[in-house]
Amino acid sequence: MKIDFDRLEPQERRIVLVASDVKYDELVNEIDWRKVVLASMASPLVVFTNGLLGVPAATIASGLFGLAAKASGYLASTWSAMEVHKEREKRSLFRRIFTKGELPIPHLSPAEAARRFKFDVGGPEDGTAYLLNPCVPQHYMPLAMANERLAQEKLAAFMQIASALGARKIELASGESLESGAAGGADVPLPKAAGQIGLAATFSSGNLVKRRVLQEFGEPLVAPHVPEEFEPWLDMDPTLRATAKTRLAGNPKTLSASLEFGRIIDVTADLSAKIADRGISVGGKYREVASTRWSFEIEFWPKHEA
């Protein structure tokens, strides 16, 4: 759906489709043979009346991309915005009835996307759906890898927040899977889960986590603080928030912190697959993040009185 992005708040564009006019026309004007078959069995004006009378965008999203689209709290504001800003389609009756139809996702051209927003190297790509990073303003990630990317960023944020708080040493103490398979075993081995989030853990022959020092720091040159770029993580994660408050309010020598990793935003593999079925690139196969908990111990340098 073509939208004036100057009229959208960030929460109203949490998912965007980067597509040239040619690519977008290709996506919406492809014949939907399922509709053709249905129309052969009943009057198309009966079968498709709802599509012509302005069905709510969230309902359209659910019909196109499955119940996971409507159930996503992260995307709810975007669906609502599409309902407010959408315009009546200017396509012929035939195309409105028998093609795959308008997509309830705000879309913009690759050139405009590159001018307005931040993407990883190589992006944005034509015909690709991107999700807004909740912790990095104006940064968009390919939908399929968004949760894995956020898990990696969460670990990196923890390390950098600890450093800014005056850490002398960060040590990995333990790790555990929070998932269980049908036989009671972990679905994803811990070594694989650690690699997924970028955690340099070591393991025994039984895949038990070995205690190890992850990082050591020299004496800080500035007072303990939380860099502004990492403040959104304090709002999202209670452990990171408690770690920062404890250090800033007091002068602990050591501090233990247990971080949980898994799906951070409620965009699922099912939703990713349904969007991909519409011919939209999602950045490859969806990457589900294993649900795990990792315990760390932070040793701090003493605070210096001003």
Image (cartoon, grey):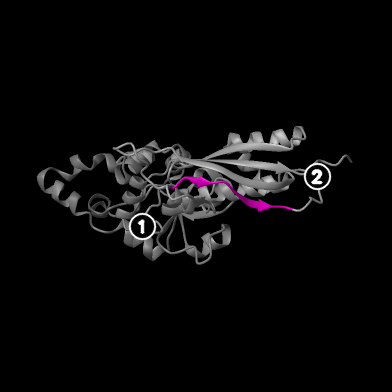
Q: Could you say where residue 43 lies in the image, as x and y percent from the top left?
A: 14, 43
Q: Which residues are magenta?
A: 207-217
Q: Is residue 75 visible?
A: yes
Residue denoted by label 1? 280
Q: What residue appears at the point 74 percent right and 35 percent down from the top-left corner?
A: 252
* Residue at the extreme right of the image, as rendered: 306
97 inside magenta stretch: no
Badge 2, how many Cα within 10 Å: few under 14, some, many 20+?
Answer: some
Q: Is residue 16 visible?
A: no
Q: What residue appears at the point 85 percent right and 42 percent down from the top-left corner?
A: 304
Q: Is residue 162 above or below residue 113?
A: above
- Element class at badge 1: loop
Of 238 and 26, which appears nearest the observer? 238
**Which amino acid does the dot numbered 2 rest on?**
Ala
Residue denoted by label 2? 223
- Element class at badge 2: loop
Q: What residue appears at the point 49 percent right and 54 percent down from the top-left corner?
A: 141
Badge 1, how many Cα within 10 Å: few under 14, some, many 20+?
Answer: many
* Residue at the extreme left of the image, as rendered: 41
Q: Quadrant of residue 71?
A: top left
Give the side of residue 6 with respect to residue 206, left or right.
right
Q: Is residue 140 above or below residue 291?
A: below
* Residue at the extreme front of the image, as rendered: 205
Q: Main secondary structure of the magenta part?
A: strand
Q: Could you say where residue 37 lies in the image, as x and y percent from the top left?
A: 14, 50
Sequence-wise, which precedes: disc 2 or disc 1?
2
Mark nearest the camera among 2 and 1 is 2
* Disc assigned to residue 114: none
Of 72 and 48, which appears nearest the observer? 72
Q: Quadrant of residue 116?
A: bottom right
